[in-house]
Amino acid sequence: MTPDQKIEWLISSGGLDDVGTRHESRQLISRTYPDATTQTRQRLIQAIKDVFASGEMESGEPSDNDRKIYDWFDVLLGADPDCELAQTAFQELQTRYPEWEPWDEPALPFHVEGPYWVRDVSPWAVEDLLSRPAAELVNEVLDFKPSPWGTPIDRDRMEEENAAKAVREVATRDVSKGLNVANELVRREVWQQVLWRELLEAWKESELNEQQYSQVLTLLHSPKLFDKNGKGITDLLLTLVRNGGKQYAMRLMPTAKSLALSIWNESKNSKSWILSETDWFTLALNSNAGLVVRFWLSAMWVESERGKKRIGRFNEDDRQFFDSVVEDSDMRGKLGQAMLATHIGYLLSFDYDWTTKRLLPLFDPEHASFVPAWHGFTWGQLRSDVGELMKPKFLSAVENIHRFEHVGVPSRRSEFVRRYANMMVYNIDEPLIKWAPELFKNGDDVDRYTFAWEIGRILENMADAQKIELWHRWLRRYWQNRLSGVPRPLEKMEVEEMLRWPKDLQVVFDEAVKLTVRMPSANLELMRISKDYVDEELARRFPSGSAQLLEYLDRIEPNTGDWDGIENVIDVLTTSHLDTALKEKVKDIGVRRVVGVAV
């Protein structure tokens, strides 16, 4: 069975939630996940979410199922720490429950699967293998025969992998012995994926000196390794250039680049599919082609001494490589182009002319890589210089926003809208003439909600002077227009987000409230009134505006919302200088929301 088939079997058999086989299931996933395709990885992550219906108990405490999902995602990260899909899934729960930590589950020397026993330890003592010559050690591993017992889980593969893990431990504990083993495997032309995968992992974990790293690079120059272990090799190459590069990285760069280029050439026949729920940059991060481009970008930083020796144009080998990436119309090219688009600002700083002439055309709707380029771009940061260059690209892209679809985690289309909103705030003087109408003409209700959410996030982090400038430049007019149905009437989802705006617009709070109370109703069921909208500080500083906002919130959704803690706000307002009618309304809210007496 292939790794994908094993994972599919576990999902379909209900093993994700089987307490009796919990250890076995996790061991199976730990071994198969690193070799699974992106499609199967996504399927597994979604299956984990579906099996354990996440949610909170009535007390507000996290459910047991949240913890089970968290632990499963920790298993996936343990199997492949560099998997962006697992990182994103795990981080979502870690953000919700920052106090949680992964549990250390003790390793079991054996376990039971039905009526059978399956060994889960190496067939040899590592000290025994370390004492043997490399040729004898390789003979032992290659001649190893799994025990005659059987189990519903692929026992032969499990024991074969345990044997390979022994090789990994040998290579980790004694780098020279690991290199001798690798040389022996090359001499015999043994290319078993499981053995080379474990050797690569050992070298990634070890602190190789320059000579050892050079030997490793020479060993890996074999096309027979690229198909099954290309990702492992590029992951290893990234350790050479990560965080500014190892001290000796410059001296090994020609050999490392040659190896990376060989893997790029061999990845021409990349699978020509893309999942509707997957974005191109995520695919690139899990592909040989995408990781080679990522390595090359980092290598360029090392060669320029961390950017200090940028000369305004690429070196010849860099230019030739990047030319080959943007000219490639194959799947390989699209994956590489998505990776380049993510780092457009970085590329501009090295070669402005090349980037504007060769990379920017990828963002045009008529280009075959329009979607991959934008997917990659929405994973990067929107720098001001990039924003200026991308103005016409954004406008042509928003006219084709339907081509992005709501794919990826987070959604690439929503990330595009977020950056579109940032462009309107920071890069466009008068966005109400064309930018806003185009978004509302071509976007859907999710896009409009995302826009409202992003404007709120921007306001939350803005300085007061910037807020005043934005308010008078276009935000007030935008709000007034929306209340009049221009370019579209406000929808409930938007109102829910815009209700948060006044609290972040305290520099024009009373003005913002006057517009807020004219908005249609919204659902406040999950909102804490005193925390999200009107707190004691606001009530003291702006009693009239706070009272009007409170009266509006009470009116639009009389039976929902969390009013806990509102009594402090009521106390402040009822002792403030308010007109009589408004003060009576506040007192009435206090009686009903605090005392609980219907009036």
Image (cartoon, rainbow, N blue to C red):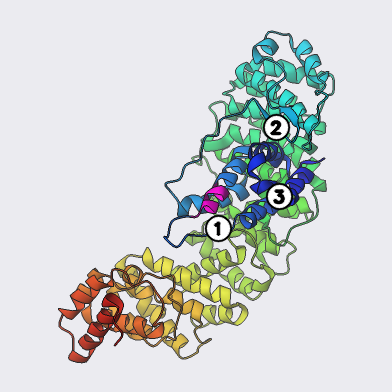
> Counting other residues with Cα less than 10 Å from the Cα at mark 2, is it few (<14), some (14-19), or many (20 or more)?
some
| Residue 14: assigned label | 3
At mark 1, the secondary structure is loop
Asked whether the residues under the numbered discs 3 and 1 touch, taking CB atoms below 8 Å apart as contact, a structural biologist would say no
Q: Residue furthest front?
A: 115
For the stretch drawn in magenta, the main secondary structure is helix
Picture coordinates of residue 460 (x, y %)? 37, 65
Left or right: 425 in relation to 70: left
Q: Who is closer to the viewer here, 320 or 577?
A: 577
Question: Which residue type does callout 3 highlight?
Answer: Gly
Disc marking residue 112: 2
Give coordinates of residue 120: x percent, y percent: 69, 27
Q: Is residue 28 above or below residue 132?
A: below
Looking at the rendered structure, the kind of residue marked 2 is: Val
Which residue: 53% across, 53% down? Answer: 66
- Give the magenta-colored segment's residue range: 63-70
Q: Is residue 505 magenta?
A: no
Q: What residue sits right under mark 1 in the picture?
A: 54
Q: Distance between the Cα atoms at labels 3 and 1? A: 17 Å
Q: Which kind of residue does numbered mark 1 sit on?
A: Ser
Badge nearest the viewer, 2 or 1: 2
